[in-house]
Amino acid sequence: MARFLVDEDLPRSLARVLADLGREASDVRDVGLRSQPDEAVMEYAVREGLTVVTGDLGFGNEVRFPPDHHRGVIVARLPN
C-alpha cells in the first residue's frame, strides 16, 4: 500500500485527509523537514519508502530525481 509524504507547499490538512482515507501520510513540517531543500525531502522519502505529494514541479525533473530511485512523486495542483 502506498505511503505518502506531503510537501510543505500543500495544505497540512492533506496528510489528515489521506489518513482519513486509510492511507499512511505525514507532512514534511511534522517530520523536521520544514524549509529543507527538495533533495533532503526526497532523501527522507526514499529512506522511509514514501511517495512524495507536492505542488513543486521541480520534483518532476527526472534528471534530478530519476524515477527508478524513489517510490514516486504526485504533483498536485490544488486551488488555494
Image: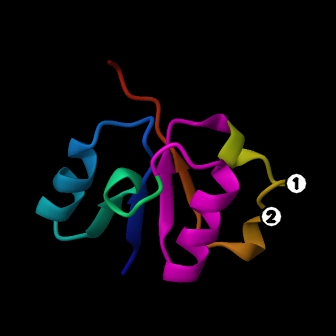
Tell me which amino acid carries mark 2.
Pro
Outermost left residue:
20
Q: Which residue is tagged 2?
A: 66
Decide if residue 71 is in sight here: no
Vertical relation: 37 (above or below) 43: above
Q: Within 10 Å of the Cα at label 2, are there few (<14), some (14-19), or many (20+) other Cα atoms?
A: few
Does 45 lie within the magenta span?
yes
Does 53 lie within the magenta span?
yes
Tell me which amino acid carries mark 1.
Val
Vertical relation: 67 (above or below) 18: below
Q: Position of residue 77 (x, y in %)?
A: 46, 30
Q: Secondary structure at mark 1?
A: loop
Q: Which residue is tagged 1?
A: 63
Q: Residue at x 70, y 46 (%)?
A: 60
Q: Position of residue 31 (x, y in %)?
A: 37, 64
Vertical relation: 22 (above or below) 73: below
Q: Secondary structure at mark 2?
A: loop
Instruction: In this rendered view, identify the residue nearer to me: 32 or 16.
Output: 32
Magenta range is 34-57
Count of picture labels: 2
Q: Within 10 Å of the Cα at label 1, are there few (<14), some (14-19), or many (20+) other Cα atoms?
A: few
Q: Residue at x 82, y 54 (%)?
A: 64
Q: Position of residue 5 (x, y in %)?
A: 42, 61
Q: Are marks 2 and 1 in contact (CB under 8 Å)?
A: yes
